Amino acid sequence: LTYSSVSAPRRLRFKEHSSNTLLVSWREPKGDFDSYLFLYNSLPGGQQKEIIVSKSDTKVLITDYNPSKDYIISVIAVRGREHSRPLQGRFKAKTAARGESVRRDESEPQRLADPVGPPDDANEISGGRTKTHHQCFHDQRLQFN
């Protein structure tokens, strides 16, 4: 899979809604896209499930949630045949207080991909888009200063 100019969704969040439902939400990416592909898998032993989510929705309620399992979540923005980089996160129910929103920096791996500038800049530059020549030159200037 090659990543395109489609920006990735941002800020994955989890909330235990009830004993058997988990609410997963995110912020929409910048730029144009058609829909989201939402993938989730419970560990151990789960089977990955895929849900196509409307562009206007930025949340999914997992209704077969099991609080004794860990959940791996990926959210991908889709435009035509192009996909963004996945926004990924892992929810560990055992470590979260019930009903509390859990936010982890590792749910945004694209932040770590570009060490140049503050994290917000890195997120904007490497959030699933192919860098333009202008951005590459900008990066080089930052690195050599």
Image (spheres, grey):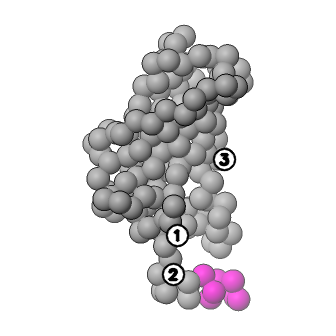
| Disc on the earlier residue, 2 or 3 | 3
Residue 108 screen position, x and y as percent: 59, 51
Residue 100: mark: none
Q: Is residue 17 left or right of residue 117?
A: left
Magenta stretch in the rendered image: 139-145
- Looking at the image, do the residues carrying marks 2 and 1 touch, with CB atoms under 8 Å apart? yes
Question: Where 64 falls versus 129 (above or below)?
Answer: above
| CA neighbours of label 3 inside 10 A, class few (<14), some (14 to 19), many (20+) | some
Residue 106: mark: 3
How far apart marks 1 and 3 lie (CA) works out to 17 Å
Give the labeled residue for mark 1. Answer: 125
Q: How many marks?
A: 3
Question: Where 20 falls versus 14 (above or below)?
Answer: above
| CA neighbours of label 2 inside 10 A, class few (<14), some (14 to 19), many (20+) | few
Tag 2: residue type?
Gln
Q: Nearer the viewer, residue 100 or 37?
A: 37
Secondary structure mostly seen in magenta is: helix
Question: Where 86 falls versus 45 (above or below)?
Answer: below
Give the labeled residue for mark 2. Answer: 135
| CA neighbours of label 1 inside 10 A, class few (<14), some (14 to 19), many (20+) | many
- Looking at the image, do the residues carrying marks 2 and 3 touch, with CB atoms under 8 Å apart? no
| SS class, disc 3 | helix
Quadrant housing the C terminus: bottom right
Residue 132 screen position, x and y as percent: 47, 81
- Specify the quadrant of the image occupied by residue 122: bottom right
Tag 3: residue type?
Glu
How far apart marks 2 and 1 lie (CA) works out to 8 Å
Residue at (64, 83) in percent of width and height: 142
